[in-house]
Amino acid sequence: MIEHIKSVIAGHDPASVTRQRKYAVLLPLVRVDDELHILFEIRSNIVSQPGETSFPGGALEERETYREAALRETEEELVLDRNEISILGEMDYIVKEDHVIKCFVGWLPDTDVSKLAPNEEVADVFTIPLQYFLTNEPLYHNVQYEIERTGDDPVKLDSDKQKYKWKTIDQQIPFYSLSDYYLWGYTAHLTHRFSELIKNKTNQINFEDDRNDK
């Protein structure tokens, strides 16, 4: 039996135990007045979480890679040709019990934001200079969630017998203080992480340059 188990596990491709939905987004960089900006969308009333700020993106379709999904969703939502989008790479991603969100950084060198005509899923678009996020940190607020179980939940019934105490879940949610828009949650998380990556690499380059000059 051990040899059988070994052969099964050795040839198994590890995957998430939970059934996670897969999503992909694009963090779009555009040029506005010769300055790099990050482009954001305002979700329309026909999609979930209307009025919130987001990046172009959505769920993966069958046999689609994360990268392909990010490109397709950006094409559809911003009504762009795929050739106008240059993927610079993939950054860190978000993992939750029921979903994974992967983020790609895209460069839209020829896109005039003022002439964009997004589809019906997008109420509006706006941009913020990248420099703003390199010099301003978000505020993180602690939010607590309590787990509630239904009366016929077998886990609840068993835990009641053993007087099991379910803990609350603490979550740190970032908020950026923008004058005209709200930027928080997953989109703020990804924006902040992107700015951290750029700052850390820039500082490393500057440090190495200073060291080489000595």
Image (cartoon, grey):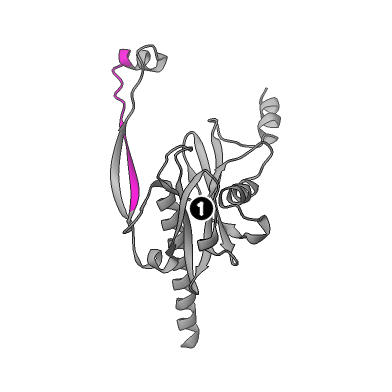
Q: Is residue 203 magenta?
A: no
Q: Is residue 58 left or right of residue 96?
A: right
Q: Quadrant of residue 81?
A: bottom right
Amino acid type, callout 1 = Asp
Q: Is residue 5 left or right of residue 92?
A: right
Residue depicted at 47% across the width and 55% down the height: 125
Residue depicted at 59% across the width and 47% down the height: 73
Classify 71 as above or below 48. Answer: below
Q: Return the x and y of residue 195 as percentages of the image width and height.
A: 44, 62
Q: Return the x and y of residue 89 as percentages of the image width and height.
A: 59, 59
How many dots with numbers?
Answer: 1
Q: Is residue 165 magenta?
A: yes
Classify 195 as above or below 155. Answer: below
Q: Return the x and y of residue 31 as percentages of the image width and height.
A: 52, 68
Q: Which residues are magenta?
A: 160-175
What quarter of the picture does the N terminus occupy?
top right
Q: Return the x and y of residue 136 as percentages of the image width and height.
A: 34, 64
Classify 54 as above or below 61. Answer: below
Q: Residues within 10 Å of mark 1 (few under 14, many from 20)?
A: few
Query: Which residue position holds label 1?
Result: 92
